[in-house]
Amino acid sequence: MGANFSSTFTDPNACSLVGSLCLQTSSPPATKPSLGDLPEGCVALVLEYLNPQEICKLAKLNRAFRGASWADFVWESKLPVNYEDLIEKVLGDDLKDKLCKREIYTRLCRANAFDDGTKKAWLDKRTRGVCLSIASKGLAITGIDDRRYWNYIPTEESWFNSVAYLQQIWWFEVDGQFEFPFPAGTYSLFFRLQLGRAAKRFGRRICNTEHVHGWEIKPVQFQIWTSDGQHASSQCFLDDPGKWNLYHAGDFVVDGANSSTKLKFSMKQIDCTHTKGGLCLDSVLVYPCKLREGLQHF
């Protein structure tokens, strides 16, 4: 009788509760969509509008972002328009078809040496501007073969591990020329110079200015010429012993019509009424004008 009584008065809410519990345990919970569910193609379209640093950070999120970060069209937008000419000039023509666009971008952002190690070129990561540096050994220096005047000295303060040091001379002249596939834009040319000879003593940097003389009498003349008729000049007294400074020679414009730009440049102080000496010549630098801010120059 007790059993019949309990079955007669069964709570209907309890049955519904048990039924709902049974339904919940029998069907798996629905999963919410995540970033990993996005197609790589869609992710790549978004990455195309980001800078390289942001792309590399997002590539660590998941497999979809990592795969999208290798899409060629994402990195082609970060490369100069004439990147194929740059590869041929700096890295060699055989690499053009062997590297993907991300690998090309990575290689171009390094300081790549070419022309027997006398030149280095690289891509600025922030602006995509192409920069060039020419070692003192890649320049035509009057009197360089006479050790009474000039010497090459090793140093860690140069990208090329050596600088040309002027002991003393009457006729001071440095010339150079090159041909390079710069992208369209405006560029500045600098000479990287230091009055005095730097060395280390007991782990500290010192600079010997014993032979520095003659630079306060007459200014040094800087000039540049391009194959399409451009010419710029400037002059400056060399000053500030013991510090590397960039001396601005002039600017030139690349319009993109030609595949390569031919440039000649010079630095002179040829007043033979007095000698000049105590100067270190490291290199010649070519930077896009938009990168000039922040550079220490005269």
Image: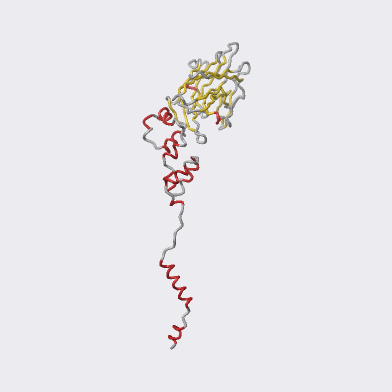
Q: Is the residue 137 above or below the residue 99 in the image?
A: above
Q: How many marks?
A: 0
Quadrant in which residue 209 is drawn: top right
Q: Position of residue 103 (x, y in %)?
A: 42, 37
The residue that appears at 51% across and 22% down in the rendered structure is 164
User: Relative to 12, is 205 above or below?
Assistant: above
- Position in image of residue 277 (x %, y %): 57, 18
Is residue 43 shown above or below 22?
A: above
The quadrant the C terminus occupies is top right
Q: Farthest residue toward the bottom?
A: 1
**Which of these two is toward me, 36 or 38?**
38
Give the residue displayed 55% in from the left and 13% down from the top. Answer: 171
The answer to whether 55 is drawn above or below residue 179 in the figure is below
Residue 256 screen position, x and y as percent? 47, 26
- Dividing the picture into quarters, in which one does residue 244 lie? top right
Is 257 positioned to the left or the right of 166 in the image? Answer: left
Seen from the viewer's position, the closer of residues 142 and 234 is 234
In the image, 196 versus 177, the foreground residue is: 177
